[in-house]
Image: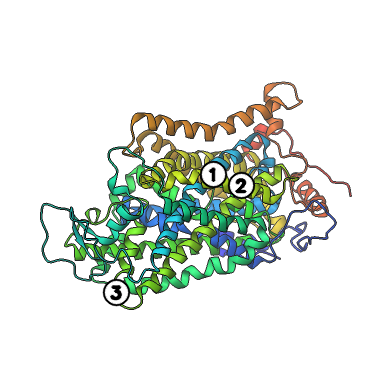
Amino acid sequence: MSGVLNQTFVGDDASETNNKSVSSVEAPSSDSGSSGEREKWNNGVEFLLSCIAMSVGLGNVWKFPSTAFKNGGGAFVIPYLIVLLIVGRPVYYLEMVMGQFSSRGSVKVYDVSPIMRGIGIGQMIAMSIVISYYAATIAVAIRFFFASFSSELPWATCDPAWTDVNCINSSSLTGKSSFNSTLPVETSAELYYSRSVTGEAFLVGDEIGVPDWKLGLCLLFIWTCMTFMLIKGIKGSGKISYFLALFPYVVMIFFAIYCFTLEGAMDGVLYFIKPEWDQLLNPTVWKEAVSQCFFSLSICFGGVIAYSSFNSFSNNIYRDAMIISWLDTFTSLLSGAIVFAIIGHLGFITNETDYTKVVHPGSGLTFITYPDALAKFEHVPNLFSLLFFFMLFVLGIGSNTGIITSVITAIRDQFPGWKNWHIVLVISVLGFSSGLLFITPASSRLIEYVDFYGVTFVTLTLAVAELICFCWIYGVERICRDIEFMLGVKTSILWRWCWKYVTPTVIAVILVVTFITGDKPKGFSFGYHVLGWTIYAISITPLILWAIWNVASQPESGLWRKIVSASRPLADWGPENISLKKKYDDFIDDHQRTGTRNAFQRIFFTQEKSYSVNI
């Protein structure tokens, strides 16, 4: 299948495909004669919907509104949109290309430059952290889901025991006319979350507390569901992707229509979309924007590469990458607008214009604002509550299974003899055990802590290394030739410049500036911060150790020659199908005669190697 072109990015030269291109080659079938070919998606729609389910998930509905609120609403949205354009979309498309072209997972894809394989291992460590707190977040959604079966939503009205605050019934549309001025004002939804669900309100100092047993049962339920889904591999997750990807939008659109009609809602939406141009100079906002971009699109974690590796060779991933990245942006903005509409309404009923005093920013923001809005539904609020929290469950399952699939793929690429269900069970047991930490009363602070040290900094660092590996050592020109061979299209100058210069530079600058000026998570003693940097070091160390081991194991004499040898693609790099691999080698040989290599490659390689496969 030939690529469908976006003229803005692909350019007018897209039709000038080299005569040697093999875009007409059909995707290899399962009986193509190569017994080593990996499992494939049943069709392109399953792949597209599975990527939507993975990339469009809790990162958009849960994390984006919280991050936007913490960074000033409109002050965050502009940097986020800029980062999506110059970082998110280029990296998403690049990872799709590398995964589909090589049919390799998130670690084995670094056969393209074995010296950099530690990137994939470091990303697996970051993914493991995300998997743990992601599942715990879904457990909170399930806790609310089961609570919605009550005759009355338990967070709709104030508990008589809450006498130490001015409590407002979340079911009320007007609030109270008078308060005890000496006590804080909070809604019943916020108090229910902080006292009845997490117990966060009862913590003293830097206490962590013990896991809540109800959340523990919910967490066990989550991991049981994901275990059954993952045991069947991508065939099972592909079939359920139709529901996982489409159902949430039905609920979100209905919810948006209702929330935008609440009194004061438009003030909150205006706060969300009104830019604060002076914040463009704040490095923390840009760091948060890049982190959110990585999280919502699931890039630089290995998931996109893993899912793409199960594609047929000629699947139109350019089209898929554009659909998913734009849909992801739309979902983030829609969920953000809904949350800020609710915050605007909460400000209206509490007579407060400073929204930071209305609700507290943090990972629990979504579980305060949405329940508050649900309590105001005049007709069957329990039904809509059940639908909403089931939607969060669906979003979380779709995203988490995608991330876990990338870990499973990386393990099975390295150890093909291991049974899938064995790997799934081990991951599930470890994931459940580590997730208990994130259902303690201090879960919001702990999620912020591990996300800062074990995810944000790690992914930023490894993203720079990933782009150096793909776009400089392997080379943008070589990637563009691979795309031409695979899809039969030429890549425009905009993509080339983003991959080679703009994207890696932006990420590197934000990483360095954040290291210097970044705000550490608050509420932790010095020892916890030392532990945090240790987690970061452990995640980055595989990159260094693997490079040293790989260089040392090269047969060439001399350090420089060993480095050069370790940086070259392995002999079997390319399409997994043998007949396609032979045609690819001939295709590359033809291009090598033109001598198109970047300066970095000319320093490293006196001659690009091509490997012929005899059939």
Distance between the Cα atoms at labels 3 and 2? 43 Å
Mark 1: amino acid:
Ser
| Image mark for residue 128 | 1
Q: Nearer the viewer, mark 3 or mark 2?
A: 2
Q: Is residue 147 visible?
A: yes
Disc 3 element: loop
* Amino acid type assigned to the residue bearing label 2 in the image: Val
Which percent across, then down, holds residue 108?
Answer: 68, 43
Label 1: state its secondary structure.
helix
Q: Which residue is the extreme one toward the top?
A: 558
At 31% from the left and 56% from the top, the residue drawn is: 73
Q: Residue at x 50, y 63 (%)?
A: 394
Q: CA distance from mark 3 to mark 1?
A: 40 Å
- Residue 298 lies left or right of residue 347; in this view the side is right
In this image, 110 relative to 193: left or right?
Answer: right
Q: Is residue 11 visible?
A: no
Q: Residue at x 35, y 51 (%)?
A: 198
Residue sitting farthest toward the right: 615
Within 10 Å of the Cα at label 1, are there few (<14), some (14-19), or many (20+) other Cα atoms? Answer: many
Q: Earlier in the sequence, mark 3 or mark 1?
A: 1
